[in-house]
Every structure is written in C-alpha cells, then in structure tokens.
Image (cartoon, grey):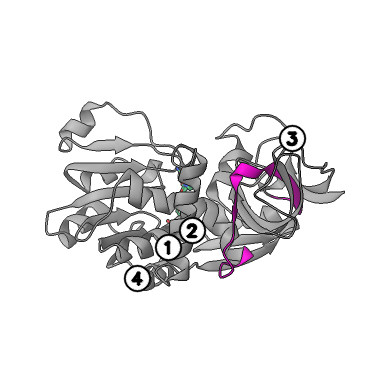
Amino acid sequence: MTKAVRVHKVGGPEVLTYEDVEVGPPGAGEVRIRQHAVGLNFIDVYFRTGLYKAPGLPFIAGNEAAGEVLAVGPGVTNFHPGDRVAYYFNLGGYASERVIPADKLVKLPDHITYEQGAVLMLKGLTVWYLLHKTFKVEQGHRVLIHAAAGGIGLLACQWARALGAHVIGTVGSKAKADLALANGCDHVILYNEENFVERVKQISRGELCDVVYDGVGKTTFPGSLSCLRPRGLFVSFGNASGPVPPFPLAELNNHGSLFATRPKLNDYVGTRKELLEGADTLFAAVINGKLHVPINHAYALKDAAKAHIDLESRATTGAAILRP
Ligand SMILES: NC(=O)c1ccc[n+]([C@@H]2O[C@H](COP(=O)([O-])OP(=O)(O)OC[C@H]3O[C@@H](n4cnc5c(N)ncnc54)[C@H](OP(=O)(O)O)[C@@H]3O)[C@@H](O)[C@H]2O)c1
C-alpha cells in the first residue's frame, strides 16, 4: 500500500482525500517510481472542481512530480532502478509511489534537485513553449505577463527578461510587485487597484505590447486585447479567475488585426523529441543560472487541501511543492 490524494467527487478543497492506494507492478513500457516532490498547479484546481474533466472518478490529483525509479516493466531499456526522473502527465501525481509510461519521464541532471524537477516539468515547460514556440520572444519585444508573481509568472518574467524583452507584469499586491521586480519585470502594475490598460499605454508611450501572456482569463479580458499593438498576439493560456467568455472574432479586427491562441502544454510536448528539446533547454537555463526556480511553499502531501486553499485564495507566490 502507498499513499495518494484522491478525488471521489468534484468540488471544493475538502474533496481531496488522503488515503491508501494499491500500486501494481509496472506493465510493458511502464516504470514504477517513488516520488520525492510533487508540483502544485492551478490545473490541479480545475480538475478538482470539474472545470477540466478527469476521465473518471475517483482519480488521483496532480500533474507533475519528481522521484526515483524503483522498477521497470518489459521493454523499458532507457530507465533503470535508481534513476532520478521527473515528469508532466495528466493526473496521478499526488502520490508517494506510482506507475507511469516510461516515455513521459525525463532524467534529471545531477544539478537539478527533485524539488526543482517537480515544479519545472509543468510550469517550466509551459514557460519554455510560451516564450519560444507560441511566440518567439526576442531582444526588444515588449511583453505583458499577468499574475507575474505566480508559479508560471516568476519563471516567465525571468526568462523573458533573459531573452532581451521589456517585461511588464501585473500582480495582486505590493509584496507580489516587489517579487516580480526582483524576478525580471521592468514595470509592475497592481491590476486590482490600477487600470492596467491605461498603465500599459503610459509605460509603452502608446506603443503597446507585442504579446500578452494571460493565465488569469475572465477578469483580464477584454483588457488584454487593448494592450496589444496592431497584429500583436493574445496568448490566453489559463483561467485562474474563470474562463474567457465567448467573443466575436471581429473583436480581433477592432483591436488591430490581432492574433489569438489558446495553447496547452500537451500540444507542444506531444512527441518524445519535443519533450526532450523542452526539458534540455529548460534544465540548461537553470544550470547556467539564467533561470532561478522560486519554490516558496512546501506542504505535506496529506495537506493538499490546505495547499489548494492557499493557491486559490492568491496566498502563494512562485512555485509550491507537496512532499509525499
Ligand atoms: N495552457 C497551459 O499549457 C498551461 C500550463 C500550466 C499552467 N497554465 C495556467 O497558468 C496559470 C498560472 O498557473 P500557476 O499554477 O502558475 O498558478 P499561479 O499563477 O501561481 O496562481 C494563480 C494566480 O492568478 C492570479 N489570479 C488572478 N485572479 C485570480 C482569482 N480570481 N483566483 C485565483 N487567482 C487569481 C493570482 O495572482 P495575483 O494575486 O497576483 O493576481 C494567483 O496567485 C493558470 O491559469 C494555469 O491554468 C496553463
């Protein structure tokens, strides 16, 4: 028997149930791992509430973690017991041990800790594809990053700055503003107190942004569109405040022939080649000191409900981990 946090019915944080689960031996192409750190993500909240549909009930929550290989199934040749590994994978993450397809795992370089690995595979890879693939951020680009002090936010601000961009971030408090400024933001807007569209106009002297990265959703829409220069790109990658409502396509025309995309990580690391390209680039950025991984909160796995309460009430900054 091992321990896991399961959801038997969708709902509030109280539905996260810490309990014994049976983990079988790995089947063909699978690996059994002991997890040392699990990443906390807003997508875990969406699955818990039912905004994103799990394939069935009950399910084990959680989408990224790191640990060591205990056993490999038939046909697995590239992983061995004792290997240090990390992954991003839909569900099953809030557990002390689990079985997972080998092709979802990447090996952790010696200089990357389990804690770092556990928060880089979903958050870090997302930041990698958003800044390198969805829109290729380059020297001189002006980018707006909402929720700049969050798990995605702090990594995105640092990396965008390292790529030479001029970074504007929005945050919900003064303390978060200080953090965002220390992590790559050139300007920070307190979007609960200030009109962020007007501030972006002021900061950019009317030139607006090349790209807006919006993981907040409902409350920053349609303001985000007004922050873009003609032919700029609106990247709506999340719904921390609720989903963006349906809108007429003509809005993109009205705001200056804009482009818009609603990307997800699966579609950028769907092949083994893409996954390894992203992970290699990400780990190199951390090892070279380009990217610092801010793990600002740690909870016992059994306290996953408390972690969700903190994340949803905007009490966290940077990344948080659960310890099995
Ligand atoms: N599409 C993808 O591939 C992908 C992958 C990973 C994550 N995501 C998305 O990225 C976003 C950030 O994820 P994360 O895990 O790093 O979370 P996070 O940014 O650490 O936490 C969410 C933040 O959103 C802000 N926020 C604004 N309105 C909110 C509200 N009504 N309720 C709660 N928070 C609100 C809060 O910051 P302030 O207090 O500063 O406003 C909060 O700290 C999420 O939308 C997530 O779904 C998308």
Q: Earlier in the sequence, mark 2 or mark 3?
A: 3
Tell me the residue that label 3 is attached to.
58
Amino acid type indicated by mark 4: Leu
Q: Earlier in the sequence, mark 4 or mark 3?
A: 3
- At mark 4, the secondary structure is helix
Quick one: 114 or 185, which is closer to the camera?
114
Q: Which residue is mark 1?
A: 154
Tell me the distance, in whole angstroms, between the alpha carbons under discs 2 and 3: 27 Å
Of mark 4 and mark 2, the one earlier in the sequence is 2
In the rendered structure, the answer to whether residue 40 lies left or right of residue 57 reads left
Q: Could you tell me if the residues under marks 1 and 4 are in contact, i.e. CB atoms within 8 Å?
A: no
Q: Which residue is mark 4?
A: 181
Cβ atoms at labels 2 and 1 below 8 Å apart: yes
Cβ at disc 1 under 8 Å from ligand 1:
no
Up the image or down, 246 lies above or below 89; here it is above
Residue displayed at 28% across by 60% down: 168
Q: Is mark 2 within 8 Å of ligand 1?
A: yes
CA–CA distance in space, label 4 to label 3: 42 Å
User: Whole-percent x and y of residue 25?
Assistant: 82, 42
